[in-house]
Structure formats: C-alpha cells, structure tokens
Amino acid sequence: MQPIQLFELTSKQAHWLTVRQSVIAGNIANANTPGYAARDVAAFQAVLQGTVSRMSATNPGHIREESLRGSVKSDSVQDGIEILPSGNSVALADELSKTGEIKRLYELNAGLVKSFHRMMLLTVRR
Amino acid sequence: MADPLSLASRIAGSGLQAQETRLRIVSENIANAQSTGETPGSDAYRRKTIGFSWELDRATGASRVNIARLGVDPSEFDLQFDPGNPAANEKGMVKMPNVNVLIELADMREANRSYEANLQTIKQTRELVSMTLDLLRAQ
C-alpha cells in the first residue's frame, strides 16, 4: 500500500504559511522603518521542489536547520516607485491583503486535515 | 526553533510598542508647542524625534522593529516679538519651540495607521492559532 502523504504535505504547507505570516508581520511592524525592504517567502511550489540547498541533520545532536531558511528574500524592485524617500518599500495595503490570503489558505489547509482525519476515523471505527 | 506563529505575534507586538513610543513623543511635542525658556534669551523646548531600525530573526528571516534612537530636532528656533515674556532677550524677542503642529499631527495619523495594521496582524495570527487548535477538538 502506498504511504499516505497528505498529512506530511499539509503540515509542510502549514509551516510555510506560518513562516510567511511571521515574515509579513515583520513587514507590517517595519512599515515606518527607514531603509527597510519588504520581504516575502518563495512560492510554496518552489520550496516544495527543494530548489534551495540546505544542511541535512543525520544525528539528533546536529543543528536542525529551519527548512525555509534561504527562501525569504526581499521583494524585487520593479520601477522604484514603491520605494519611499526614506528607503522603505513596504506597501501596507499589499501586506494586509497577503495576510488575508494566508488566512484563506490556512483555513483550507486545516479543513483538509480535519476531513482527512474524519475519513481515517471512519475506516477504523467499523 | 521558535513557533513561527508566536514569533509573528511577538513581531507585531514589537510594532505596537514602537508606534506607542512614537505617539508618546508626538504628544510630548504637541504639549510643549508653546514652552519657552525661563531666563532672558534662553532656549525654548526642542522638538524630540524618534528613529526605528529592524532586527532580523536569523532562523526565519522575519524582522522585528526596534527603536534605534531618541533624538532632538537641531533646527533653528522661531523668533517672536514678545517683550513681556520672561524669556525675551534685550530686543524683546523670544525663542519659540521648533515644533510644527501640522507635522506632529501628520506623524500621529501615520502612527495610528501603523498601529492599526499591527493590531490586525495580531488578530489574524490568533485566528490561525485557533484554527490549528480546532483540529484537536472532537470531530
């Protein structure tokens, strides 16, 4: 039987979403910091395909590296219009809509886990 | 490795704190917009300023906000003719504080808006946490 990978996948996505939430929270907190460039996490698909190289932990004593380390980058600047005279490039409206998107995806994620869990319980109960 | 969600609320909390301090500075400036010196020719109240800086969280790449420096505005004082004022010099001129109330009000609006955005982030993060905890509840 094929191993069931849905839980692994959803937990990976939940982790990606929570890291993204903390990065966006950092952007919003720094909306008035001079010289701060807005950051974002790489797309989930890119993270999932493992385009970022990292250290592997083969022993419990090894340092466990954050799996999304290296995927957080400052947004690329298109034409420089979004940069304020203070050097800050945070657009508050953009960041708030991103948190809305994160919430929506997280809701979907939690709902999927819930329904999958219910399905597993159904098979066990009989 | 810290939980990214609690990190998110801590970061938004640091934003709230920074904007609170900024509001305090603004209110100090507005309250002292007319505070002159007490002896003839002495300096008036100097406008206070606040600067922010960011501090990167190495593990996740998110950054909290810090107050980098509290300074004073070095610009010139306005001179006003008011011979009856105890701070008037021999020509009757009084140094008035270099506070521009319009600028302070604009600053206050901005601080207000950023405070709201941070508050919104905390609310949003709390919802994510409660969605996660909901998974544990009886189905």
Image (cartoon, coloured by chain):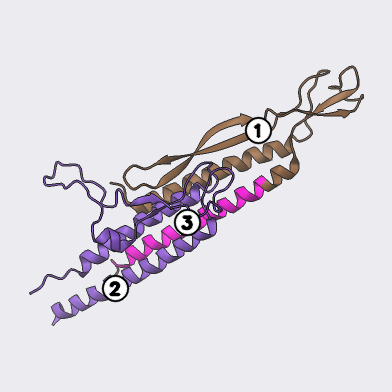
Chain colours: A purple, B brown
Percent position of residue A40, x then y: 40, 54
Q: Is residue B111 magenta?
A: yes
Q: Are marks 3 and 2 in contact (CB under 8 Å)?
A: no
Above or below A98: residue B8: above
Q: Quadrant of residue A50?
A: bottom left
Q: Earlier in the sequence, mark 3 or mark 1?
A: 1
- The alpha-carbon separation of the residues under discs 3 and 1 comes to 29 Å
Disc 2 target residue: A112
Q: Magenta residues: mostly which secondary structure?
A: helix
- Say which of A75 and B70 sits in front: A75
Amino acid of disc 2: Leu
Q: Mark 3: which secondary structure?
A: helix
- Can residue A73 be spotted in the picture? yes
For residue A123, above or below residue A75: below
Residue on which disc 3 sits? B121
Q: CA distance from mark 3 to mark 2?
A: 24 Å
> How dense is the environment of label 3, judged by Cα within 10 Å: few (below 14), some, or many (20 and up)?
many
Q: Amino acid at mark 3?
A: Thr
For the residues marked 2 and 1, what is the alpha-carbon distance in whole angstroms? 53 Å
Which quadrant, please, contains the C terminus of chain B? bottom left
Q: Residue at x 80, y 21 (%)?
A: B38
Residue B139 at least partly seen: no
Q: Which residues are magenta?
A: B107-135
- Residue B48 numbered tag: 1
- Residue reaching furthest to the left: A1
Q: Chain of mark 3?
A: B
